[in-house]
Image: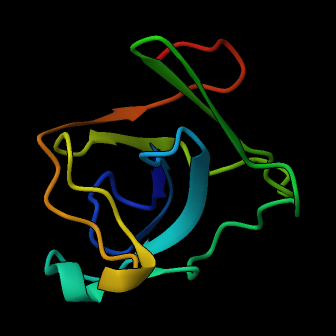
Amino acid sequence: MGFSKNGLMVGSSAVVGWVNPNGTGTGLQYFLEEQDPNQVVPNQGELKLVENKTMLIRQGNLMYLAFQLNTPQPLVEVLYAVGPNGKLPSDANGLKLTQHQDRVSTTLNYDTGNA
């Protein structure tokens, strides 16, 4: 899930979560500098995440990613993307992300909850 100034992925910051093969969840912030995976930088970004408030829970085939931001109001252009099955970031590959299989960009109204 990312937050963008213009509705595009490039230049946005995102929180990315995945479930490791051992069943534990991981959630990290990424800065989406460019489309090339080498320019999607882990542990970088403009989101002010509250420390120890990011968690990922898996229940069956569902995955829930929760995080807390320290901001008066996040950007209204919200990005959602789903990565390919079986291609998880790891320390061995520098936590690089692979191209997503599906994505959407929407504008979220925080007053009404409408997108």
Left or right of 12, for residue 56:
right
| Image quadrant in which you'd find residue 10 | bottom left
Counting from the top left corner in percent of width and height, residue 100 is at 17, 49
Left or right of 64, for residue 93:
left
Give the colour scheme of this rendering.
Answer: rainbow
State whether residue 41 is above or below residue 73.
below
Point out the residue furthest to the front here.
22
Q: How many labels does the image show?
A: 0
Q: Which of 79 and 25 is in front in this view?
A: 25
Q: Which residue does the image show at 62% across and 14% down from the upper left?
A: 113
Left or right of 54, for residue 105:
left
Q: Which residue does the image show at 21% across and 55% down from the upper left?
A: 87
Counting from the top left corner in percent of width and height, residue 64 is at 57, 26
Q: Nearer the viewer, residue 107 or 11?
A: 11
Q: Which residue does the image show at 42% across and 33% down from the upper left?
A: 107
| Image quadrant in which you'd find residue 101 | top left
| Image quadrant in which you'd find residue 80 | top left
Counting from the top left corner in percent of width and height, residue 2 is at 46, 52
State whether residue 96 is above or below residue 56.
below
State whether residue 66 is above or below residue 29.
above
Q: Which residue does the image show at 36% across and 75% down from the upper left?
A: 11
Counting from the top left corner in percent of width and height, residue 72 is at 85, 51
* Quadrant occupied by the C terminus: top left
